[in-house]
Image (cartoon, helix red, strand yellow):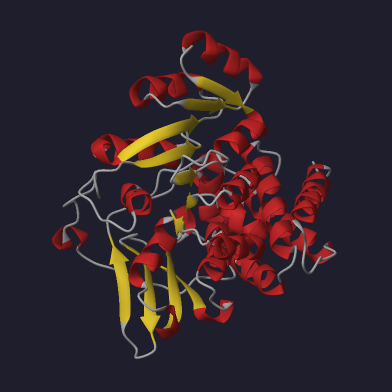
């Protein structure tokens, strides 16, 4: 990179992606200038990050935590809540916003940043699942870059040279903790068993989604919007080693894949430093001999029906993906609270989609309204 540091803000700095992003920045501090850190309820970690990174602005979830931060950091601008996130994303001194918050909270700040012509490093699935058409249209209008941070979409982005020459996108899935288990073992699995992911260390919600393969379904919807690719040309392949993060097949039959041991540092760094490549946390970490073997399997749609459900919702479009996302998320929360069995997540989500009254071309307000309605319906079941 040139001598000018890239000015970035991190939404979700205390989460899994946010903490790893800070590790990337600490490895190459001469390349980045962190304008703002936005964290959730983990105030102790946020305080630690502020002391290390020394941002100009900090945003926390609650007013109570904001008051605590103001008392300790009198020289830093302190914000809180959704309005605080909006203000951070309105700051045009930013070159890039890393959106690593979880849930629908990421959508409005992302749109605000795009309106202000700030590039986006996106690690928030809901933004594109809920409003992919609107977001990508705005990205094009404002002529900004939206770089995917998910390892699968980052891999595809790295493999594509000319989108017009691509015949198929291949998204890999580890298969989660139940890949070799029976359907009966899976649907009745405990929370502890479900959270025991064999390859990745992630938040609880995304780990449950990985166990049901809903996570892969949401990634298919994301890929559709990110790369303007028909659903028929997006394939999911189970790859238990999680070495091949995704691949692209070209019109001539050539397949280009991106490889690496399971780590989010590389896709995070790729997005933050794009279009440059730098030495970082995972430099020289890959070894073909240690990788040893690569296995691939077709997904079992009988055992993992949530993946098929996501394809169907994506193809129908409109507010069906909004319904899919909201119903699944609330069902996952219920499972984590041990109110339902793992197998009930699919049943609840399918029921909500069956009953859904679709809005073909929804506005942002209609998207949030539908999201609210679906969540209320699901919560009323428990």
Q: Quadrant of residue 27?
A: top left
Q: Quadrant of residue 330?
A: top right
Residue 37 against residue 139 in the figure, above or below: above
Residue shown at the point (46%, 15%) measured from the top left: 75
Residue 20 against residue 262 in the figure, above or below: above
Can you say which quadrant of the picture contains the C terminus?
A: top right
Q: Mark yes or no: residue 185 visible.
A: no
Q: Position of residue 289 (x, y in %)?
A: 14, 62
Q: Position of residue 173 (x, y in %)?
A: 44, 63
Residue shown at the point (50%, 43%) measured from the top left: 100
Q: Position of residue 95 (x, y in %)?
A: 43, 46
Q: Quadrant of residue 286?
A: bottom left
Residue shown at the point (40%, 68%) measured from the top left: 156
Residue 84 against residue 292 in the figure, above or below: above
Residue shown at the point (65%, 54%) measured from the top left: 343
In front of the other: 299 or 263: 263
């Amino acid at each position: 990179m040139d001598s000018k540091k890239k000015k970035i803000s991190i939404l979700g700095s205390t989460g899994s992606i946010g903490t790893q992003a800070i590790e990337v920045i600490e490895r190459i501090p001469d390349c980045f200038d962190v304008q703002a850190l936005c964290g959730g309820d983990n105030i102790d970690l946020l305080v630690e990050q502020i002391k290390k990174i020394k941002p100009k602005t900090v945003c926390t979830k609650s007013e109570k935590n904001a008051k605590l931060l103001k008392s300790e950091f009198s020289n830093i601008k302190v914000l809180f809540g959704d309005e605080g996130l909006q203000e951070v994303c309105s700051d045009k001194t930013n070159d890039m916003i890393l959106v690593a918050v979880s849930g629908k909270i990421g959508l409005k700040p992302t749109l605000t940043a795009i309106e202000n012509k700030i590039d986006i490093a996106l690690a928030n699935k809901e933004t594109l699942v809920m409003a992919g058409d609107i977001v990508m249209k705005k990205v094009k209008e404002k002529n900004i870059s939206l770089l995917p941070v998910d390892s699968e979409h980052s891999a595809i982005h790295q493999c594509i040279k000319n989108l017009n020459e691509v015949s198929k996108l291949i998204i890999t899935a580890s298969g989660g903790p139940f890949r070799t288990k029976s359907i009966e073992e899976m649907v009745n699995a405990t929370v502890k068993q479900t959270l025991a992911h064999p390859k990745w260390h992630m938040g609880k919600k995304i780990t449950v989604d990985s166990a049901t393969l809903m996570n892969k379904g949401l990634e298919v919807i994301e890929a559709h919007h990110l790369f303007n690719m028909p659903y028929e040309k997006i394939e999911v392949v189970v790859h238990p080693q999680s070495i091949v993060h995704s691949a692209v097949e070209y019109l001539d039959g050539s397949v280009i894949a991106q490889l690496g041991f399971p780590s989010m540092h590389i896709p995070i760094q790729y997005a933050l430093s794009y279009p440059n490549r730098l030495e970082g946390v995972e430099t020289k970490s890959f070894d073909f001999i240690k990788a040893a073997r690569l296995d691939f399997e077709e997904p079992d749609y009988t055992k993992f029906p949530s993946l098929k459900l996501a394809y169907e919702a994506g193809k129908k479009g409109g507010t069906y993906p909004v319904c899919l996302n909201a119903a699944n998320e609330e069902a996952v929360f219920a499972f984590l609270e041990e109110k339902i069995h793992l197998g009930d997540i699919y049943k609840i989500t399918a029921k909500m989609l069956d009953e859904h009254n679709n809005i073909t071309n929804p506005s942002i307000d209609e998207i949030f309204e539908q999201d609210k309605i679906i969540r209320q319906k699901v919560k009323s079941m428990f």
